[in-house]
Structure formats: C-alpha cells, structure tokens
Image (cartoon, coloured by chain):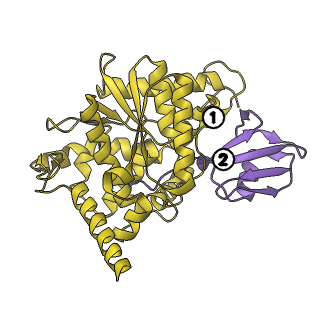
Amino acid sequence: MKVLLRNPRREVTVAGNRRVKEILRELDILPETVLVIRGDDLVTADQVVRDDESIELRPVMSGGRA
Amino acid sequence: MKCRRCGGTATLELRRHNAAFCADDFVEFFRNQVREAIRRHRMFTREERVLVAVSGGKDSLALWDVLIDEGYDTTGLYLDLGIFDYSVESRAKCEAFASRRRVPLIVRRVADEVGAPVPVIKQVTRRPPCSGCGLSKRYLMNRTALETGVPVVATGHNLDDEAATLFGSVMHWQTDALPRQSPALASTHPKLVRRVKPLYRLSERETAAYAFLRRIDYIVEECPFAAGATSIAHKEILNRMEDASPGAKHNFLFGFLEKARPAFERAEGHVLQECARCGQVTTSTVCAFCKLADQVKRASLDADARGAR
C-alpha cells in the first residue's frame, strides 16, 4: 500500500492489510502528530488498511512562533 | 472504535479524553470546547467586534470558522510576512476563506510597516526569524485593532502551542513571561487591546481534524523558517511525553494556569507607558517595534552606502 507523507511531500510503500497503528509504528511516527486520511475520511489507529488502498499521514504540527 | 456519543464508527480517537468521536460529534465537541473557553475567561460578547488574526494555517482558520458559525461579529487580519511562496499561498487561503464565508479581511504587509519583509529582518537582526516575526505580529495586531476600533484580538494558539511556550519559559525560568501566559490577557492600558486564545483547550491534532472535517482549505506546508525553531523541538519532546502518558500536555498547561500562574502574577510589576516615537504601549522609552524598524533602516542605509562606493 502507498503512504503519502508531507514536509517534504513524498510517497512510501509499506505492507498493507494491517492496522494503522502498526503502520505508524513501522514509520516511527507518533499517532499524536498526524491525521490519518483515507479518501475523504479520517481513520482511527485500530482500523485496517488494505494493500490496494492509499493513506495520507498529514502532520499537524505548526509553529516557530516566538 | 465507536463514537462516544452516538455509537457509530469513530473517525478520531482522543486518548487524553479516553474517547473517540464520529465526524459530526467531534465537530460538536470542538465547538463546545471553544464555547467553554470563551465563557470561562469572558473573552468577548456577541455585541463586540472581534479581530481574528489569521495566517492561512489550520488553527486560525478553524477558529474563524467556529466564531462565524457561533454568530460573532468577526473581521480577519492577515499579516503578509513576505516569506516567498509561503506568504503568497497563505494569503490566498485567507482571502479564499473570507470570500467563501463572506466576512471582511484586513491585509497588512510587514514590509510596509517595518521597512523590510521577515527574511530581510532575519538577516539584519541576526536573531532567529521567529523573534522579529513574532514581535512585528503582536505589534501590528494591537495597532490594527486600535485603528479599527476593535476591542479584542483572537489568535489561533492551541493547547500544544501554549504547552510548548510554557515548557520553554519554565526551562529558562523566565518568571517575567509566566504571568503573561494566559488564555485571556485583559487590556491594562487604553492603547492595549484584549488578547484571547479561544483554542487553548484543543490540541493541534484536534484543530487539524476540525479543519479537515469542515473542508477548510488551509496551508499544510510549514513556514520555511520554522525548521529548527525551539518551539518545534519543545513540541516534539511534549509529544513523546503525551505518547507515554496521554493527557500530559493538558495536565502541564492546565495545572500551571490553575495552580502556579497566580503566584507569578503577584510578582509582576511592569509599568506601561507610550512609546516616545509611535505612541504604542511599551515598558521602555522607545518600543521594541520602533527599535526593530530603526535597525532595518540603518542596515538599508549601510547597504546603499556600500553600493554607492
């Protein structure tokens, strides 16, 4: 399955048919730091993503404020 | 995972609340948190105009969206920092939002006010870019509110922003900064408007989820100058703590606000006066904004002189 990452924008391929939390763990991404987007919906960490699907891991951190 | 309210399929888990929500119930949860922030700190009333500082990012546009839907009389303020394509895109997002929601938007260019855009200010001051940028933004928000007769400025600072700022202040024991960290700062001088942060109860993941679910078109890319900023490093540390112990950020910030802040508030004793140059509020004879503008002007004259040689 394909995973779209941002900042910088890039795509990686990982094994699918797994729960979101396992994919995040493999990519060393904390659940608190991203939205998991599938199509027009958000998905929770316990949901399974099939091998033929794509998800976007959109970072939620903004900043640099003084 | 099931929605806590309706039992339908959840779209977002909030570990710190030990809860999950479907899209509709999460949006309602989010709005309730903003209502509670406004009520608890008496941020503003429906009879007052509110100047909403917008950057084109998820937080400020989510805030503006909620306030419009709640029936508040809002005007947006976009400060064009002159940060290359990032500013072009973020301004376009704010203008598109204002046009779609049919609300007024004021645009001010930092380059017109300070004499140079943020990238040049960074070079001239040799300080981190967020320093001159933050100073300019705070000054221009207050001045624009005064000029337009608006009594209060609302910013999109969220729980993560506030926890990271608190972490930075505590790490350096900046006891003068601690009393000023509050969801609502009252007007303590006729030329200082009220400043409020109605999103302080919501994490940045929650504001991002709200913006996504409400189909708000916001700028996802980070400011190019944010990389390496101290506040980002502090957020990363706090997120590690949050992962190990959900609610850590909330407890850190809310514990401070409820238990520690009053003690530091009593210790504060700054005398506010008007800047001899521009008339805005400062604690010294000439305000930091005028000093920054002078520094930019001197650097520009030096560059002209070098060019003439």
Mark 1 falls within which chain? B
Residue B131 located left or right of residue B66: left
Label 2 crowd bin: few (<14), some (14–19), many (20+), radius 10 Å = many
* Chain label for disc 2: A
Pointers 1 and 2 within a single chain: no
Residue bearing mark 1: B212
Residue drawn at 64 percent across, 34 percent down: B12
Q: Which chain is purple?
A: A
Can residue B244 be seen? Answer: no
Q: Is B261 rendered above or below residue B122?
A: above
Please state, as top left, top right, bottom left or bottom right, where the C terminus of chain B lies in the image: bottom left
| Colour in which the image shows chain B | yellow
Q: Callout 2: helix, strand or loop? A: strand
**Disc number placed over residue B199 in the picture, else none:** none
Give the residue at x 89% y 46%: A51
* Residue type pointed to by label 2: Arg
**Res B280 → quadrant:** top left
- Residue B118 lies, in percent from the top left, at 41, 59
**Residue B255 image point, x, y percent:** 34, 43
List the residue tagged with mark 2: A58
Q: Position of residue B249 (x, y in %)?
A: 45, 47
Q: CA distance from mark 1 to mark 2?
A: 10 Å
